[in-house]
Amino acid sequence: MRTAEPAALRSSGGGPDRATFLELFFDLVYVFALTRISARAFEDLVLEGGQTGWSAVTGGGKTLLLLVALWAVWQGTAWTTSRYDPHHLWLQIIVITALISAMVMGVAIPRAFGHSGLMFATAYVVAQVSRPAILVLVLHKVQYRRLKRRMLITFCTTGVLWLAGALLPVNARVALWTAALVLEYLAARFGWPVPGLGRSTVSRWDIHGEHLAERYQQIFLVALGETILLAGLSFTRSPTSPGMVTAFAVALATSVLLWRIYVQRAGQILGEAVTRAAHPATVGRSAADTHLVMVIGVVATAIGYELVIEHPIGHNELPWLAVILGGPAVFLAGRARFEYEVFGRVSPSRLVGIAALLLPVPLLVRLAPLVASGFAAAVLTAVAVADARRAWGRPPEDAAPPF
C-alpha cells in the first residue's frame, strides 16, 4: 500500500497494469445491483399484473434511470483507478466508498421511487462527491487539482437535485434525478466547465488505456454473468415443464452468443485500440457510452430470460417483447458502435440483425414468449456465424481507431 501522492502516473507506455483485487471486489457488488434492476423491471411487468402502454414506458424509464446512476458510479471509479495509482491508500478509500455506496444503492433500487428514495440518493451523492473531494486533498499538482475542484463543484450542485428529489413525489423525483444525470453527463462531455475556473479538454486527460479497456471488459462480463444468474434462479424456483426447460436452454445459448459477438474481435483488442489512438481518452470516453448501451441491452435480455422461463407458453405482451427482442437489438446497436471505435467500420450483419429483431414484432406479439426468445437466439446465431465467416482463414485484424 502506498501513501505518497497518487499523481497522474498511469501511462500506456508502462506496459499492462491489471485491475486490483479491490477493483474486482467492487465489480462483484454490481452483480447484486444488476439483479435488483432486473427484479424491479420484472415486478413491473409481471408481479403487479403487468403494464401496458404508457405505464410500461414510464416504468421502464424509471428503471433505466436507476441503471444509469449505477453506471455513473462505476464509470467514475474506473476512470479514477485508470488515471491514478489504485494501490495508493486514498485511492483504495475511494474504491471502498464507491463499493459501499453501490451496495446501498442496490438495496434501495426496488423501492427507490418510494420510501427508499433518500437512501438511494444519499448513497449516490456520497460516492460521487467523495471521489473528487479526496483527490483535491491529496493531489499536489495544480493542473490535477483544478479539474477535481470543478468536478467537486459539479457533483455538489447536482447532489442538491438528487437529495431534493428524494423528498418529493414520484414525478418530481424523476424530473430532478433525470436533470441531475443529464447535467453530470454534459459536464463530463465538455470538460467539467465551471464559471471562473474554465474547462479541460477530454483528449488531454492522462489515462492508462489498457487498464481502462480491461475494466470495460470486466463490467460487460459482470452484466453477462447476471444473465446466467437470473436464468438459473428463474429456472430453479419454479416447477419444471418442457417449455421451461427449453426456455432455460435458449437463455444459456443466448448468453453464450452475446459473449461470442462481443469478443469477436473488437472485445479482445479494445486495449490496443485505446493505446493506438491519437487521443486515448477520447476513445475511452466513447467506449464508456458504448458499453453502457451494451450493458443496458444485456440487462434487458436477462429480464426477458426471466419472463420466458416463467411464462414460456401463452399470450405474449408488447412490453415483454421490448426486452425479449429489444434487449438483443440494443446490444447489437452498442456492438456496432463498438466495432466502429476499434476498427473504424461497422459490419452489415449488425444492422441486418437489428432489423431482423424488430421487424417481426407485429407477428411475434401474437405468439408465445418462447417463440420470440428462440427467434432472438436464431438472429444472434446468424450474426455470430457472419463474424466467424469474415474472420475465417484471415490473419487477426489489427485495431484501427478512427479517433
Image: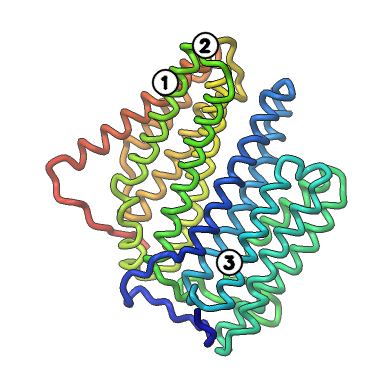
Q: Is residue 279 left or right of residue 22?
A: left
Where is the C terminus found, in terms of image quarters?
bottom left
Q: CA distance from mark 2 to mark 3?
A: 47 Å
Q: Residues within 10 Å of mark 1 (few under 14, many from 20)?
A: some
Q: Residue at x 64, y 74 (%)?
A: 132
Q: Residue at x 61, y 36 (%)?
A: 38
Mark 3, residue position: 95
Q: Residue at x 26, y 32 (%)?
A: 385
Which label sits in the foreground, 3 or 1?
3
Q: Nearer the viewer, residue 237 or 397?
A: 237
245 vs 113: above or below: above
Mark 1, residue position: 375
The first of marks 2 and 3 along the sequence is 3
The first of marks 1 and 2 along the sequence is 2
Q: Is residue 143 left or right of residue 250?
A: right
Residue 193 coordinates in the image, percent (x, y):
64, 73
Q: Nearer the viewer, residue 71 or 43?
A: 43
Q: Residue at x 39, y 66 (%)?
A: 18
330 vs 236: above or below: below
Residue 276 coordinates in the image, percent (x, y):
31, 67
Residue 402 coordinates in the image, percent (x, y):
34, 60
Q: Tell me which amino acid carries mark 2.
A: Leu
